[in-house]
Amino acid sequence: MVNIFDQWLVGNAGDLRLLSAIGIIVHWWILQYTIGLLTMVFIVELVGRRKNDEQLLKMAKSMSKIVAVNFAIGAATGSMSEFGLVIFWPNLLRIVGKFFFVPLYLEIFAFLAEVVFVYMYHYTWDRVDPKLHLTIGFFAALGSIISALMIVSVNALMNYPIGLHPTYNPYGNGAWTAPYFTLIDQNGNTVKYVPDGNNPVPPANLDQLLESTVSYYGIWGLLFSWPAIVSFLHAVGAAITVTSFTLLGIYAYRYLTPRNDEEKEYYMKGIRFQSLFALIIISIQGFIFGHMSGTDVAHYTPEKLAAMEGTTNQFFTFGKIIPTEPLIAFLSYGSFKAKIMNYDTIPEGFRPPIIIHYLYNIKIGTALLLGVDAVILVLYFYILKKQLPTWFIKLQVLTPFAANLVATFGWMVREIGRKPFTVYGLMTSEQAATTQPVSWILIALVIIYVVSLGAITLILDYKIGKRK
C-alpha cells in the first residue's frame, strides 16, 4: 500500500512545495486577520456609533491596534511568499505570467491603499469627525478585500485555467476521462490540446498560445471569471469566520480572567456580539460560499473531488465507515444518480494525493462542531436569554484554534489537491520548478524563522489586547 505522505511529498518538486507551503500558510494566518479584523472593526464601530454604545466603540478601537501590528507583519510574510514564487517557480512566471501580470500589478495599488488607510484609521481615532473616521475604515477594509481579490484570482487561474473543458460524465461509469483545452494561436485559430493522462506534456509553444488566448478573451474576463469570484468569496468568508471565532475565544479567555466586574461585563458583551456574528458568517460560508466552491471543484477538477471523497480501494477512507458519497454527489451534481469519479481510474499524471481526503474530512467535521457551538451560544443569549455555564465559556477558548485548523486545512486541500500540477492540466510542479536543489537545513531554518515570527506576533497582540 502506498504511503500517503510519500505520495504527497516524494518527487514532483516536493521539497520546493514544502518550502512554499510554509511561507503561504504563515502568510495566510496573518492575512486572514488583516481582512477579518478590518471588516469586523468597521462593522463594530458602525454599530457602536449608531447605538452610541461606548463598549462597542472600545472593542473597535482595541481591534484597530491589533490590525496595525498584524498588517506590518503580514507585509513581511507577503514579501516572503512573493520572493518564493519568483525564486522557486521561475517557469511558472515565464509561461503563465501573462495572465498573472494584471492582477498582481493591481494588487500593488490595493496594498498601497491598505498602507495609507490602515494606519490613518488607527491614528485618527477620536481625532476626526466620526463619519470621516468610518469612511477611512471603510476604505481600509475595501483595500484589503480588493487585494485579496487580485491574489485569489491568480490562484483561481491556477486551479481553473483559461480554455479548460472538463469531460467527466457524472452519470456514466465513474471512470476518468481526459479534459481538454481550447487555446487561440496568433492567427486567431482554435487549437485543441488534450493532455496525456500519464505524461501531460504541454505544447512546445504554450507560451505563445497563452499570450494569444489572453489577448483574445481579454484579461478582465479572466480576472472576473465565475471560478475567480467564487474563490474570492470563499477566501474572504473564511478570513472573517476565523476572525470572529478568534475574537470569541479571546473574549471568553478575558472573561474568565477579569480584573474587575466592569471588565467582566465588557467581555461578556463581546462574547454575546461575536456569537451572533459567528453564526451568521459561518452559515453563509458553509451553505453558500462553500457549496459554490464545491460545485466548481466537481465540475472543473473532478479528480480533486474523487480524492476528497476517497473513492478508492487502495486506502482506508472515512466513506467506508459513513457512506457520504451519494449525498456529496447530490450536492455536487444535483442528482442522487450521479457518481463521483473513481479515484483508482485516474492516471498518475492527474492523480491528486489522497492525503487531502483526511484533511478535508477533519476540516468539515471541525467546521460542523464550530457551527453547533455558535448555535448553542445564540440559543442561550438570544432565545433562552440565560447565563452561559462556566464550563461552556471555558470551551470557547478553543474556538480560535479550531477555526484556524478549518481554514488551514481548507487551503491545503485546495493547493495539494491541484497536484501533480502547478497550473491544472497545463504545467506540472516539476515543469514550473527551479533546478536548484534545496537543502533540508534551509527548510529547518525557514521553519525556525516563521515560528519565531508567529510567536512575536502572538505576544504583541496579547499585550495590546490586555491593555485597558
Image (cartoon, rainbow, N blue to C red):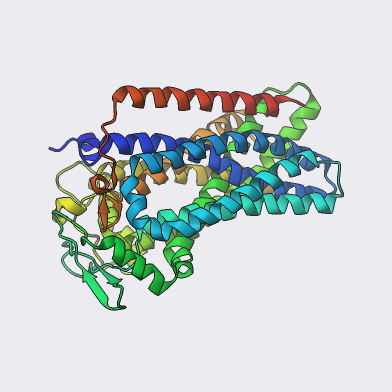
**Considering only vertical position in the picture, is 276 above or below 339?**
above
Determine if residue 389 is in view: no
- Using residue 269 as the reference point, say whether residue 219 is left or right of it: left
**Considering only vertical position in the picture, is 458 above or below 178?**
above
Q: In front: 135, or 310?
A: 135
- Using residue 346 as the reference point, say whether residue 440 is left or right of it: right
Q: In front: 132, or 215?
A: 215
Q: Position of residue 293 (x, y in %)?
A: 42, 58
**Considering only vertical position in the picture, is 112 above or below 202?**
above
- Identify the residue at horizontal 48%, vertical 66% (top origin): 224
- Identify the residue at horizontal 51%, vertical 48% (top origin): 238
Q: Quadrant of residue 58?
A: top right
Q: Position of residue 287 (x, y in %)?
A: 48, 58
Q: In front: 455, or 113?
A: 113
Q: In front: 152, or 433?
A: 433
- Using residue 174 as the reference point, say whether residue 409 is left or right of it: right
Q: Position of residue 102 (x, y in %)?
A: 48, 59
- Using residue 193 as the reference point, say whether residue 69 is left or right of it: right
Picture quarter with the N terminus: top left
Q: Position of residue 175 (x, y in %)?
A: 16, 62
Picture quarter with the C terminus: top right
- Identify the residue at horizontal 77%, vertical 33% (top origin): 265
